[in-house]
Image (tube, rainbow, N blue to C red):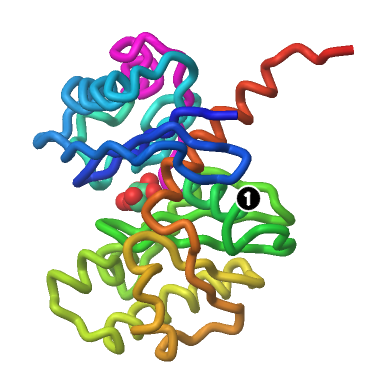
Amino acid sequence: MTMMGIDIGGSGIKGAPVDLEHGQLAIDRHRIPTPQPSKPDAVASVVAEIVQHFEWQGPIGCTFPAVIKDGVARTAANVHKTWIGTNVREIVQAKTGQPVLVLNDADAAALAEMRYGIGKDRQGTVILLTFGTGIGSAIFVDGTLVPNTEFGHLQVRGKDAEHRASDRVRDDKDLSWKKWARRVNEFLCHLEVLFTPDLFIFGGGISKKFDKYASYLEAQAEILPAQLLNEAGIVGAALAADQALSRSRPEVA
Ligand code: BGC
């Protein structure tokens, strides 16, 4: 089974048909920089360009870096504020002419990681965090996702956690891995007080550099790097679209 996955991010929009049996891209992904300003019409046009690139016809799973409720963006921390209240599903459907399912980017990455990656068959409470421009989050309890958790906006020392400990902050402030990990540890400590997770999975751009900071991390829960790296969002978007579709398929007697 192949399904189209699109990952909308603050700096790039990328997509590819996904082989859902193996949780891998079926063809090399196509990436286009996110238009600036990242307003709805311009972003949806880029999504349509990617879909056309693959001459894809059929359902599309699409991530978005915000709270998504019934296809509508409720927030817009790292994309243009005009997205707030916009029906992302409808605007992308109108541009592509295909049925679309939209979900939060970190939720998508986590779905992929729990199905095909390091979280496979993990029970208990698992929290996946993506460290990039912001901090995305997803929480699974015995394999079930609670969507739109937004832990990156928890307050740490009077600031959103993502304004202290995202990968972008590490870069902008030229923090050493040790100093950045200290900030991350404060964030993990908050999450442990609230949820007592069994496992943290570190995703996003920093997952492939895990060796550089793993020894500085401190938490009672196990901490592991994500395995799907840059492709997790695309794979998770396709997976979510497939799951939504099979829910709406009539049962065959
Ligand atoms: C947004 C989240 C998103 C995360 C990663 C945060 O600023 O509020 O919805 O998952 O960035 O892109």
Give above or below for 229 relative to 9: below
x 45%, y 28%: residue: 4
Residue 200 lies left or right of residue 56; in this view the side is right
Secondary structure found at label 1: helix
Vertical position of residue 219 compared to residue 44: above or below: below
**Residue occupying image coordinates x 72% and y 59%:** 121
Tell me the quarter of the picture where residue 33 sits: top left
Q: Residue furthest front?
A: 27
Identify the residue at image location x=70%, y=52%: 143
Report if residue 207 lies within the magenta region. Answer: no
Given the image, on which type of amino acid does mark 1 rest?
A: Arg
Left or right: 91, with 34 as reference point: right
| Residue tagged 1 | 115
Front-lying residue, 7 or 64: 7
Is 197 drawn above or below residue 189 in the view shown?
above
How many C-alpha atoms fall within 10 Å of the one at disc 1: few (<14), some, or many (≥20)? some
Q: Within 8 Å of ligand 1, the CB of disc 1? A: no
Q: Between residues 246 and 148, which one lies in front from this camera angle?
A: 246
- Quadrant placement of the C terminus: top right
Q: Identify the image quadrant of the N terminus.
A: top right
Whole-percent x and y of residue 192? 57, 74
Q: Position of residue 141 (x, y in %)?
A: 69, 56
Residue at 36%, 20% in the rendered image: 87
Question: From this viewpoint, which residue is outermost toward the left?
Answer: 36
Residue 68: name its quadrant. Answer: top left
Q: Is residue 100 magenta?
A: yes
**How far across and how far down the image is residue 48, in percent?**
27, 20
Depth order, front residue of 98/137: 98
Q: Which residues are magenta?
A: 86-106
Where residue 247 sits, quadrant-wise, is top right
